[in-house]
Image (cartoon, grey):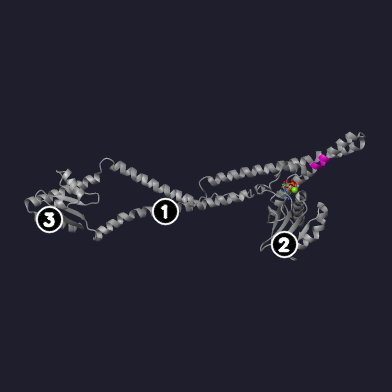
């Protein structure tokens, strides 16, 4: 916003300078009528004074000029020709027929026919009136500048207020709330931008929903044919005797089992991802809950791991089934990559509890961290295909944690591999 402010201020000043320049060029480009007028007045004044000096007396003319100077807050000086400033003397030498000169600094030089001296009329620097005029001339630009600053500031303030509403909605939408829409009330909308954003958001949300519905429907529809192939292959396996054919059929059955698991995983992901998916929160002492389930998980995953808890009492609210699934997914991944050690650590702070799963495997490069929890994201495609994962495990973990009002994060582990942290808010009451 500061950049837009500075840009609009500089733009305004440049535009103003250009318009002043254009005005000067058009109005005063060839002949300056103000200057012509001033010269005519000076000439008339000089002629009157010259007339008095010639027809009355020099003293009378000087007296009248002194009166004029006094009335108009000016000073009158007399110079013999040899005391004239060089530039003025040069001017009168070059323009023998001219009897007056009006300088750029408003100094007026006069010469009479019957007097060898020159007269100078200049603004009296001690006069209050002259001081006020000079002050006015100097501060007028400050007033212009101040009004430009004020205008740019107010404009940017109004714009930024409206932009913030749009930005907040865009952030909300980007973080997964596809129902987020920008207000279209006239005092918060930014032209047609809010309506256009909302239309785009609706289109994207519709697309996402229809995409999800399609995946869901396909997964559902696949279940029956997969089951039928599996079931018929098993019947066939019992009937045929040829060992080569038996081997091929067994491989088909294994493949259908894999497909069945993928379909189950897809349907589970679709369930957990739905914003209205049910969650059964119950208050537990997390330390006890972890200790109670430790052996069960080791058995289920087929992998021993160390559970480190330094507290005895950490009350929070969890859905036991969902959190269990998240932990099993993480330890299952760690098992695939760890060399020797997997450690699950509980690290509480003032308002969150982190359940960290560390391993001493190859770790994950930070360039993958932002995408890692997207469904089907693979760090290393060849390695993942060989390991047989579907690429849905971490996406499921992410949604389980969001359901809990928490999150999941990835980092480097002090053991040398990856560290995944399940972040849970500390909540004692529903
Ligand atoms: P699924 O869990 O669905 O069976 P998957 O394990 O391949 O399949 P995710 O659990 O989502 O999928 O993991 C995504 C990718 O992140 C993995 O393919 C793997 O490359 C990488 N990854 C996950 N955990 C680790 C880990 N502990 N160490 C190194 N890489 C990991
Ligand atoms: Mg996995």
Instruction: Check the picture and name the quadrant holding the C terminus.
Output: bottom right
Q: CA distance from mark 3 to mark 1?
A: 51 Å
Nearer the N terminus, badge 1 or badge 2?
Answer: 1
**Disc 1 secondary structure class:** helix
Could you classify mark 3 by the number of other residues whose Cα lies within 10 Å: few (under 14), some (14-19), or many (20 or more)? some
Q: CA distance from mark 3 to mark 2?
A: 103 Å
**Disc 3 secondary structure class:** helix
- Asked if 362 appears above or below 246 in the picture, the reply is below
- Asked if 293 appears above or below 98 in the picture, the reply is below
What percent of the width, then of the height, locates residue 310? 74, 64
**Nearer-the-camera pick, 260 or 84:** 84
Residue 285 shows in this picture:
no
Nearer the N terminus, badge 3 or badge 1?
Answer: 3
Q: Which residues are magenta?
A: 254-258
What percent of the width, then of the height, locates residue 243? 91, 35
Could you classify mark 2 by the number of other residues whose Cα lies within 10 Å: few (under 14), some (14-19), or many (20 or more)? many
* Residue matched to label 3: 62
Q: Is residue 255 magenta?
A: yes
Nearer the N terminus, badge 3 or badge 2?
Answer: 3
Residue drawn at 78 percent across, 45 percent down: 264
Nearest to viewer (mark 3 / mark 1): 3
Residue drawn at 24 percent across, 44 percent down: 33
Q: Is residue 10 magenta?
A: no
What percent of the width, then of the height, locates residue 350? 66, 64
* Residue matched to label 2: 316
Q: As drawn, is 30 to the left or to the right of 164?
A: left
Determine contact: label 1, label 2, CB under 8 Å: no
Is the stretch drawn in magenta largely helix, strand or loop?
Answer: helix
Residue drawn at 36 percent across, 44 percent down: 19
What percent of the width, then of the height, locates residue 187? 50, 52
């Amino acid at each position: 916003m500061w950049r837009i402010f500075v840009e609009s201020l500089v733009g305004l000043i440049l535009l103003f300078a250009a318009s002043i320049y254009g005005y000067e060029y058009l109005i005063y480009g060839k002949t300056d009528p103000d200057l012509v007028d001033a010269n005519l007045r000076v000439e008339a004044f000089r002629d009157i004074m010259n007339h008095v000096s010639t027809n009355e007396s020099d003293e009378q003319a000087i007296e009248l000029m002194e009166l004029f100077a006094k009335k108009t807050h000016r000073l009158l000086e007399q110079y013999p020709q040899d005391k004239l400033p060089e530039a003025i003397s040069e001017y009168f030498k070059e323009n023998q027929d001219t009897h007056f000169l009006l300088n750029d600094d408003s100094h007026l030089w006069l010469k009479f026919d019957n007097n060898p001296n020159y007269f100078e009329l200049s603004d009296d620097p001690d006069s209050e009136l002259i001081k006020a005029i000079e002050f006015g001339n100097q501060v007028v630009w400050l007033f212009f500048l101040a009004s430009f600053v004020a205008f740019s500031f107010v404009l940017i303030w109004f714009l930024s207020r409206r932009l913030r509403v749009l930005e907040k909605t865009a952030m909300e939408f980007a973080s997964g709330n596809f129902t987020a829409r920008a207000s279209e009330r006239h005092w918060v909308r930014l032209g047609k931008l809010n309506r256009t954003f909302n239309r785009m958001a609706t289109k994207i949300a519709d697309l996402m929903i229809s995409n999800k519905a399609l995946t869901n429907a396909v997964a559902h529809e696949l279940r029956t044919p997969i089951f039928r192939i599996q079931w018929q292959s098993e019947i066939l396996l019992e009937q045929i005797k040829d060992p080569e054919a038996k081997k091929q059929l067994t491989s088909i059955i294994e493949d259908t089992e894999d497909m069945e698991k993928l379909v189950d995983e897809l349907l589970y992901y679709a369930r957990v991802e739905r914003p209205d998916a049910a969650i059964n929160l119950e208050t537990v002492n997390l330390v006890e809950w972890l200790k109670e389930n430790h052996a069960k998980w080791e058995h289920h995953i087929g992998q021993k791991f160390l559970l480190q808890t330094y507290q005895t009492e950490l009350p929070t609210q969890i859905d036991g089934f969902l959190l269990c699934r998240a932990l099993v997914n993480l330890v299952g991944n760690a098992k695939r990559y760890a060399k020797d050690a997997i450690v699950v650590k509980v690290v509480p702070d003032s308002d969150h509890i982190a359940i960290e799963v560390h391993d001493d495997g190859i770790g994950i490069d930070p360039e993958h961290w932002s995408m890692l929890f997207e469904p089907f994201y693979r760090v290393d495609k060849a390695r993942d295909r060989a390991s047989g994962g579907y690429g849905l495990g971490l996406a499921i973990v992410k949604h389980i944690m969001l359901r809990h009002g928490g999150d999941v994060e990835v980092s480097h582990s002090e053991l040398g591999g990856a560290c995944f942290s399940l972040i849970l808010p500390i909540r004692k009451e529903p």
